[in-house]
Amino acid sequence: MTVDWTAIRDDFPILKRVIDGRPLVYLDSGNTSQKPRQVIEAMDAFQRNSYAPINRSAYRLASEATDLFEGARASVARFINAPSADEIVFTKNATEALNLVASSWGGNNLRAGDAVVLTHMEHHANIVPWQMLAAAKGIEIRWVPLTDDGQLDLTNLDQLLDGAKAFSFTAMSNVLGTITPVTALSAAAHRAGAIAIVDACQYVPHNVTDVQAWDADLIAFSSHKMCGPSGIGVLWGRMELLDAIPPYIGGGNMIADVRLEGFTSAPVPAKFEAGTPAITEAVGFGAAVEYLESIGMTQVRRHEMDLTQYAIDTLTARYGDDITIHGPHNVEVRGGVLSFAFRGIHPHDISQVLDQRNVCVRAGHHCAKPLMRLLGANATARASLYLYNNQADVDALVDALDGASDIFGF
Amino acid sequence: MPGLEDLYREIILDHYRTPRNRGDLPVPPALHAEGHNPLCGDEITVFLDVASVDGVSRVVDVKVNGQGCSISQSSASMMSQAVKGKSVAEVRALVRKFKGMMSIEDALDEPAIDVPLGDLEALQGVVKFPVRIKCATLAWNTMLQALDTPIDA
């Protein structure tokens, strides 16, 4: 099936925006993605016609809202091939999901001296919660190093995993674009008796995700990077594991009973969903995954591989040794996240100059400071692609970079 | 949108290419502080030798180290030139005047001593690019931190 990518682009109203007479060139989807009208309209319609509390009121409107909310959970479960929608825990975002894991699983299962293995390419969201746990409980953190081309160096993985209780790793680096071998990493963790935790925040929006094929234990991702609204994310976990760990935040909705002496938890997923959740956002998230399903994630991935190849080829052809694109250059093992150094110009200045042409890129440390230190940079400029980008967007980036040379040409 | 020429004035680029007073001072006796811009990863360290000259506490030497964008680096370089030799009271007045230009200090709160901004006025264009104000003020906030360090720390 061929996809009409121009029609896809037309689904995103913001891409029609003109600033100072120029079109918007949005290349910051690794940060957060733009929203198609299907998502905007679903949220609007829900707020206008169906908004009500969920899971707690008896009237028909509340029942309708609950059905739409739970329908979103079912759509998300289908999207990642989860065995059961009950294993989808809605969180605030992937960061909260990873904090839930460190706090509830780690707090309950780790003792002083226990080891958790992370990689050198993690986002702060998969570092700091473990460091907080290390400070509180005295656990050990071990780090999987990287190869020169920005892939995981798995040479000593079995030694690093020896005796470890958990291996928590990214499925795709938000800085290097590197896609990691999740199934093999999960298997290695299990061989060592550790659980496998996956930060799939950058992966799920761009690839076919099959959590059963991955065979990991806990997986975190966010709605806002996959055409859905911000304010909602997912923790998927094996039911027996989610069932065995204590709740994270206490309050309404997460209890079976409360007495003066104490409480009993509701079943998963309600156990981890205290308080009124992001109801409209869940409906929007459901619409987002249905939108992506209607296109097909195989097609989305193919489109991004083609565009990433085009970007690498075009940038390299134009600027040669003046540009360094970090991470692997083989698009089979990377996504459309292109962090680069250009002619010694500070990324913040690059971003400023590109903004003059409405080219939106991220400049900074990308919440991955340990990785940045490894790259020997305080910051990089990062262009990240999504299904709505096209070759003209890449061309605009390549042309606009010349403007930076005009000002900082030294 | 304001043009980039408002931001990247020639004197700014000159300080960026050739930063003045770059380096370290031995601590102690120098006061020092590290500043970070968590947004973009810029890092800066300011060293100050403060001594009493004729009964007046003065910044007799200053060095700046770190990495950052053209705005944070040029602002640090120009700041180092401006404060060298000034009394601590004048330096504090200058910081307030500079922050006033960056529209982050109450304009009614006029400093007691008027210290001219000189070359620093070139950074005025930064105000038109609000995201960059933090770049321009990083060195200044870091210098204030250094000044407030207890002497025997």
Image (spheres, grey):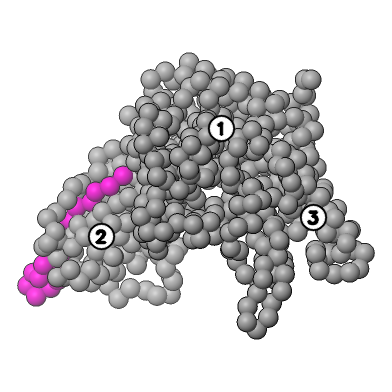
Q: Do labels 3 and 1 share a chain?
A: yes
Q: Is mark 2 on a helix, strand or loop?
A: strand
Q: Which x, y percent locates residue A114?
A: 39, 53
Q: Which chain carries label 2?
A: B
Where A358 sits versus B74, above or below?
above
Q: Name the residue under label 2.
A: B33
At 25% from the left edge and 40% from the top edge, which residue is drawn? B18
Check residue A69 in the rendering and tell me which mark sits there, or answer none: 3
Q: What stretch is highlighted in magenta?
A: B51-67
Task: Place residue A215 in its image quadrant.
Answer: top right
- Badge 2 crowding class, 10 Å Cα cut-off, few under 14, some 14 to 19, many 20 or more, is some
Q: Is residue A300 visible?
A: yes
Depth check, mark 2 against mark 1: the one in front is: 1
User: Which residue is pictured at 63% across the width and 48% down the height?
Assistant: A237
Q: Main secondary structure of the magenta part?
A: strand
Residue beneath the point at 86% across and 64% down: A62
Q: Type of residue at label 3?
A: Phe
Q: Mark 1 points at which residue?
A: A183
